[in-house]
Image (tube, rainbow, N blue to C red):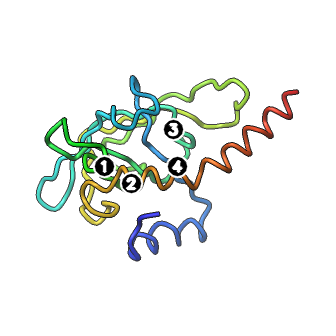
């Protein structure tokens, strides 16, 4: 949805060549699907960003090799959502990235769903997706593309349950 050519080459090419997984880290404890309630923050320090926060209900959270992470980058808490967040590519094995325990899911027990904690994670500037403040638009674009297949999966699950 938003990666530049170098990011696509580095991350998407690897997914074709190796059995890799990624995960989408937007939902947080206490705010659910309310993207504007996100508390995770990324602060620019020189040529990198420092990420701190928690995400919850992350599908593939424990098996992903890298994550899309949406974090608040606006200093002013009153900044509208369309300008308050930035998206980042975060490697799962970077220092400060800690997957939580696997959740017990009703009906989807095979899904590796868990929380992820980000503690002083250093993100190189080249891992920012788009420009500062474009994260909300990127996240909504990803939701638009993924909701139909998620809905189809839910219908299949419900059909099987009946």
Task: Give me the C-alpha separation between circle 2 and circle 3.
Answer: 20 Å
Q: In this rendering, which labeled residue sits more in front, label 3 or label 4?
A: 4
Residue drawn at point x = 78 percent, y = 35 percent: 157
Mark 3 vs 1, N-terminal side: 3
Mark 4 vs 1, N-terminal side: 1
3 lies above or below 67: below
Do the CB atoms of the residues marked 2 and 1 lie less than 8 Å apart? yes
The residue indicated by pointer 1 is 82
Q: In this rendering, which labeled residue sits more in front, label 3 or label 1?
A: 1
The residue indicated by pointer 3 is 58
What SS does tag 2 mark? helix
What SS does tag 4 mark? helix
Front residue of 1/23: it is 1
Query: Mark 4, residues whose alpha carbon is within 10 Å: few (<14), some, or many (≥20)?
Result: few
Task: Give me the C-alpha separation between circle 2 and circle 1.
Answer: 7 Å
The residue indicated by pointer 2 is 137
Do the CB atoms of the residues marked 2 and 3 lie less than 8 Å apart? no
The residue indicated by pointer 4 is 143
């Amino acid at each position: 949805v938003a990666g530049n050519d170098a990011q696509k080459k580095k991350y998407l090419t690897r997914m074709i060549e190796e059995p890799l997984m990624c995960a989408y880290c937007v939902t947080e404890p206490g705010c659910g699907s309310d993207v504007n309630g996100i508390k995770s923050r990324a602060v620019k320090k020189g040529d990198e960003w420092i990420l701190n926060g928690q995400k919850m209900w992350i599908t593939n959270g424990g098996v992903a090799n890298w994550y899309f992470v949406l974090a608040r980058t606006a200093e002013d808490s009153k900044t509208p959502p369309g300008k308050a967040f930035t998206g980042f590519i975060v490697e799962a094995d970077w220092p400060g990235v800690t997957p939580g325990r696997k959740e017990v899911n009703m009906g989807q027990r095979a899904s590796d769903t868990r929380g992820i904690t980000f503690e002083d994670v250093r993100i190189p500037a080249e891992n920012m997706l788009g420009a500062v403040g474009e994260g909300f638009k990127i996240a909504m674009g990803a939701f638009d593309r993924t909701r139909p297949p998620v809905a189809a999966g839910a219908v299949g699950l419900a059909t099987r349950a009946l």
